Structures are given as structure tokens and as C-alpha cells.
Image (cartoon, rainbow, N blue to C red):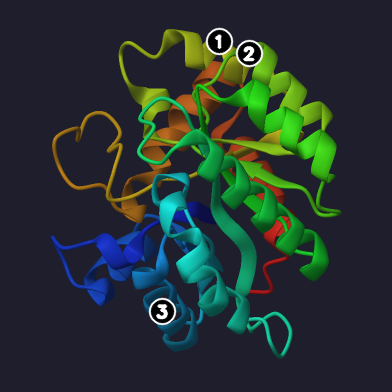
Amino acid sequence: MELIDSHAHLYMLEHSDVDTVLSRAKEAGVSTMVTIGTEQSDWDLNKTLGKTHKNIFYTLGTHPHSATSWEEWKPQLLSYFNGGVPPKCVAIGEIGLDFFYDNSPRKEQLLCFEEQVELAKSLDLPIAIHCREAFDDLFEVLNRVGLPNRRGVMHCFTGTTEEAKKSVDLGFKISFSGILTFKKAESLRETAKALPLDALMIETDCPFLTPEPHRGKPNEPSYLPLTAKVLSSVLALDLEEVVGKTTANTRAVFALTS
């Protein structure tokens, strides 16, 4: 079986070097991963990882936590696309709204999100969305600004079943992280059960959200099969079918070529 880690922060991994992490991932059946941009300091790191490793792709974007820096960082982000979309850059992200932590003022989060959605539309790229306690505002922005042609993914989904279904109706995939394995995540598992397999993806969000039974350790792509197994159990489907479809969904969203 071939798994794809659709959302990882490989540049944040400190417990092992990248080659060791990739070796363990390969042994676990994780062939490919997408390392996600969140702020100016990681954009070049992600681009380098994509350039030096065949099966690593990357995204570029400003996270809502850093929205106060958007106006300062925007010229550099735009400069990456002066000659078109760079090789192996597969989405704009991680972008969105976070009204749970409110690390940036909401007005600035909204502006940062809107302008990056517009950028994705202009480049015909999908978006990788972070959303916490802000789905009403998120949907309002998407309806007003317009949806990217290639849509994208609601990463590390923790919203309600209704919010998940609305996202799917808009054309987005729903990605589940290791949270799906947590003992107290029964409502999230019920949400997964309510969605079609065609709409699902999986991720680690490493080094965060390590799945059971390894909670407390740094997360990494080799743990992705644990989330896949729980998802297959929740859906009452064979693991091979769930892995095959979530992998195909991820390839389709990001137009992965290897």
C-alpha cells in the first residue's frame, strides 16, 4: 500500500534528521509527503526540501497566526511566482482563520486569507485551509471572493459534521490527522463516518498531533498508517480500500506527479 502524508511540517522535525525520518516513512509505506508553508522563515526551507527529495512536494502560504506580518511578507511570497508556479509547489497554504487562539486580530486574518485565496485563484492552485472556530466567516469569504477552480483541502479537520458536509458540497476534501485516533475524539469519528470516502484525505501535521499509541512523542510521517487504520475501522472498510482512495484523493487535489 502507498500512503501520502498530505500535510507535514518537515522543517520543524528536530528529533531526527530528515533522511532518517524519510527512511522510517518509506518502511511504513509512506511514499510521498507534502511539507506545508506557514510563514516567511519556512518558505525557502520547504522549497529546498522539495528540490532535494524526489517525493517531497511543498506549499507556500501565511498561517492565520502570522496574519499581522502578511503585508510585510507578501512581496516575498509573490516573488516566488514571478516566473509562474515553481516546480513542486502544489498549493497555497496553510491559510485560513483561527478564532480559537486569535493570535492575530480577526480583521487582519480575514485580509490575509482573502488575498491568498485570490492568489490561488490567479495561479490556478488549490488551497490548504486551517480553520478553528471560524467556519461561518470562512465560508462567507469563500462565497464572496470566489472559490479556487481546484478547490483544496480542509486540513486537520475538527469542525462539526455540518461544517464538513458544507465544505464537501463546496468541493473541498476533508483531511483527518492523528486526532482521529484520540480516545476522546468520538464526535470526530462520527463526522468521518458521515462523509463519502471520495472526500477524505489523511495527514500527520507532524511534529504535532501524534496518534495513539504514541502520544507524547514527536509526530512524523511513519505514524500515518495508524490514522489510516482507525479511519478504515470507522468506515467499516478494508484498509487497502481506504488507503488507496485517500492516496488517490491527495494526488488529485495536489496534482502530484510521482
Which three-letter amino acid code belongs to the residue tagged 2? Thr
- Badge 1: residue crowd in 10 Å (few <14, some 14–19, many ≥20): some
Q: Position of residue 241 (x, y in %)?
A: 65, 37
Which three-letter amino acid code belongs to the residue tagged 1? Glu
> Is the residue 76 above or below the residue 72 in the image?
below
- Badge 2: residue crowd in 10 Å (few <14, some 14–19, many ≥20): some
Disc with the residue nearer the chain's start (3 vs 1): 3
Which one is in front, 55 or 107?
107
Which one is in front, 177 or 92?
92
**At x 63% / y 84%, what residue is drawn?**
87
Q: Which mark is residue 190?
A: 1
Return the residue at label 2.
161
Q: Is residue 236 visible?
A: no
Disc with the residue nearer the chain's start (2 vs 1): 2
Left or right: where 82 falls relative to 53: right
Q: Which mark is residue 49?
A: 3
Q: Furthest-bottom residue in view?
A: 83
